[in-house]
Structures are given as C-alpha cells and as structure tokens.
Amino acid sequence: MISFHENIVFLLAKAHQKAQGVLKGHLLDFGLTPMQCLFMESLWEEDGLSVGEIGRRIALDTATLAGVLERLVTAGWVMRETDRDDGRVTRVALTEKARSAIPGLTEIIVKTNSELLSNFPREKKILLKRFLRDMRG
C-alpha cells in the first residue's frame, strides 16, 4: 500500500493549499481572493472576453464563474456588457479601478511565485512548471 506521504493527490493538495494561502495573504490589501485575481488576470491579456471564454481559459465551471463574476461586479472591479452582435453573450470588461490595480497585482503575483519557488534551483523550477502543465493535459 502507498503511504499518503507518497500519494500524488495528497502532495498536490498540500502544495495547492500552501500556494493559495501565500497568494491569499498577499491579496488581503486588495480585498480579492486568488480566484477573483485569476479571473481578472484573464482580462489583462484580453479585455472584453465573454464569460464562457473566461471560463475556458481559466478552467472554471459555470457555477463557480457566476459567483466570482457577481462578487467582482459588486466590488467594482469589472462590468458586464451584453454583446452587440449576439444578445445572448455577456462580455466582461475591467473597470478603471481594476486597470489601475494591475501593476500592484502583477507585483503580488511575481512576489508569490518567487516566494513559493525560492528554494528551487532554476532547473527544478522549469521542470516543476513543465510537469504541472503536462499533468493538466
């Protein structure tokens, strides 16, 4: 029988908990959760995405996506817009509040990545990212 200390599911879960905890702590001043930050990051790359496209890019199910979107709209980070060409499609755009926060949030993401990977030599950082991407499929 495999020990839970060697179980990949356990190891990934504990690594995820640590990563989320570190990021969550860094985001406190902004009042954002890691998931809300990830949602907004997808819009940094391309503002005005449809809700469905955001879900595909960050691999979130519709129910989770709806809750995250609602909280971001209520807090003034993003706004919803109906697509001009297809009224069934909802697009999401960053507000000025969100655009002005991008440099600070980017700094937090870089700081979090550096903190989490600080004990890894360069080669192991590259391998870890590659393994995680490969596992994701």
Image (cartoon, rainbow, N blue to C red):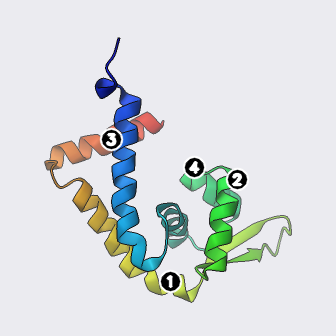
Q: CA distance from mark 3 to mark 4?
A: 18 Å
Of badges 4 and 2, the one in the foreground is 2
Q: Label 3 belongs to which residue?
A: 130
Q: Tell me if label 3 and label 4 are in contact, CB under 8 Å.
A: no
Residue at left offset 22%, top offset 53%: 117
Q: Which mark is residue 99?
A: 1
Name which residue type carries label 4: Ala
Vertical position of residue 109 compared to residue 104: above or below:
above
Q: CA distance from mark 2 to mark 3?
A: 28 Å
Question: For numbered disc 4, what is the local secondary structure?
Answer: loop
Q: Which mark is residue 1?
A: none
Give the crowd class for mark 1: few <14, some 14-19, many >=20 residues within 10 Å.
some
Q: Position of residue 71 (x, y in %)?
A: 64, 71
Question: For numbered disc 1, what is the local secondary structure?
Answer: helix
Residue at left offset 53%, top offset 66%: 36
Residue at left offset 32%, top offset 45%: 129
| Lower position in the chain sequence, tag 3 or tag 4 | 4
Of badges 1 and 3, the one in the foreground is 1
Q: CA distance from mark 1 to mark 3?
A: 30 Å
Q: In what quadrant of the picture does the N terminus appear?
A: top left
Name which residue type carries label 2: Thr
Q: CA distance from mark 1 to mark 4?
A: 23 Å
Q: Label 2 belongs to which residue?
A: 62
Question: For numbered disc 2, what is the local secondary structure?
Answer: helix
| Lower position in the chain sequence, tag 2 or tag 3 | 2
Q: Label 4 belongs to which residue?
A: 59
